[in-house]
Amino acid sequence: MSQDGRSIEEQAVQRRAQILGMSYLNTFQVDKPLFAELLSVPELKQYRAIPINVDSHHILFGVTNTTSHQTMNQLKNRFLDHRVSFSLISDTGFAEYILLYDPPKKVVYQDVKLSGVAQDDLFAQVTATLSQVLADDVVAYLVKQAHNLKSSDIHLENQKNAVRVRLRVDGVLHPVAELSHEKYRQVLSSVAIAANVSTASGDSQTGHINQTYKLATGEEVTVNLRVETVPTVYGQDVVMRLFDTNLEFLTLDKLGLSDIERKAVDDVIAHPSGMVMVVGPTGSGKTTTLYSLVNTLNSPERKIITLEDPVEYFLPGVVQVPVKGDVNKEGFADKLRAVLRLDPDVVMIGEIRDQDTARTSLQAALTGHLVLSTFHASSTAAALMRMLDAIGINPLFASAMHLIMAQRLVRRLDDSTKIEYVPDEALVNQLQGIIDSFPPGLAKPDLSQLKLYKPGKSAEVPFGYTGQIAIREQLQMTPGIQKLLRQPPNTLTSAMLEDQAVAEGMRTMMHDGILKVIAGQTTLEEVFRVVG
């Protein structure tokens, strides 16, 4: 409370004391000795009375406007060998005394550490800490730990008896704590208010949090999260995805593109029109790739407009339009038609979700705009087939689509702990079968002296992995692909498209992954885990 607010409160209490015929005491102006042996803390709170001054004959209690006459009589009867008197004090003064008698327990936040073995004690400590702090502190603490562990997202999952808290680190989820359902309701309310979503909605929702929280320790935590909620059997689950606001990392140079991949991207984005799609499942790095493309194209000579649900990174010099994809509101397709009238050079569409958006995007790509978007598909060939299903046969389609990039993230082996081994004959034969399917022109590694690596372990690197790398495939509109796209759709399959693309030089995600395995960057198990 400000000094002016405190002064107003004390003046009001003083007037109240005059009306009641009581003495008044401004506790802000007096020393505060404690007489803990007189009344217990629960009794102080129950009676709403504080011993202000005590000697061998007299006790002065400070009471508030809500202390009853019955309570004052009880205190007189309890201390019959003293002369008991009362002074009226403010509620703020009473609260200050209570803090002196019952100071808040110091919150000790345990840093979450992932060791690769069961950590029941740490799990219990974190659970206990989260149960006693404010809801905002729970969010700030989890975000801080996620940043420390380089986690991509935080999962709050309703179970029958509790709410499980897990962090995704390098693509793998790790349990770190539990919340009671009562505590979770408070946390959910805090998240909902900050992200502008509803706790009572029966539909999935998307929101965004960009603000600073202060922990009970006084430490400030800046939070930049995309929030996804979905109703489940036991309650509303929440996934909070972290975003790094440092735009220096959103460049093509930071994506780890090979020379061939980078040349393909540079050639396409150098053209003033056409469509580029980045495809893959949730958590595969599509958004980072898309923003890196936009950030690379961002210059004073270009007008760039983005349509996003929600806006995740804020790019200076780029016109960013938030879009809510609700069926009863203006969606991506309607907003896209509107922004095309603003004469943009580049349009970024956060995600193609429906036929109308797909058709409008392709029309924009055909009329002098460079269109960038993401799409949910398992591979480049599957993305092409899904687009064909969405828009139907269109002879101009092949000329509008310039590049499709599919990607997955695999965990990177830690160079200081990885363990070398010689694969058995069956595994070598399996790898040779994949290498034999390499496209023409791609060098085939010699497996005669092959050595692979598996993850080791250390205190600093308990799982043997540090960070993630992308495995990619890039499908371009080659003459063979264009020819296939012109044949009747009921005769076309994604396997045919992939075979043709490989025959004309495309390296698939499996090919890229195997090359990274042979180079010792990741493991075969990781590639099979994410690619299949």
Image (cartoon, helix red, strand yellow):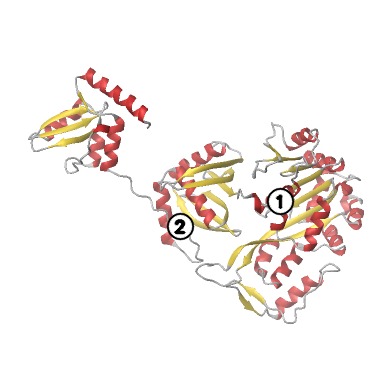
Please tell me whether mark 1 sits on a helix, a strand or a loop: helix
Picture quarter with the C terminus = bottom right
Inter-mark Cα distance, 1 to 2: 32 Å
The disc label shown at residue 292, or none: 1
Amino acid bearing label 2: Asp
State the image quarter where residue 54 is shown.
top left
Q: Is residue 203 left or right of residue 101?
A: right
Amino acid bearing label 1: Ser
Circle 2 sits on which residue? 111
**Which residue is the extreme one toward the top?**
19
Front residue of this view, candidates 306 and 351: 306
Q: Can see residue 523?
A: yes
Q: Is residue 287 above or below residue 337?
A: below
Residue at 50% x, 51% y: name it.
144
> Which percent across, then down, holds residue 524?
67, 70
* Front position among marks 1 and 2: 1
> Which percent across, then down, holds residue 137?
45, 45
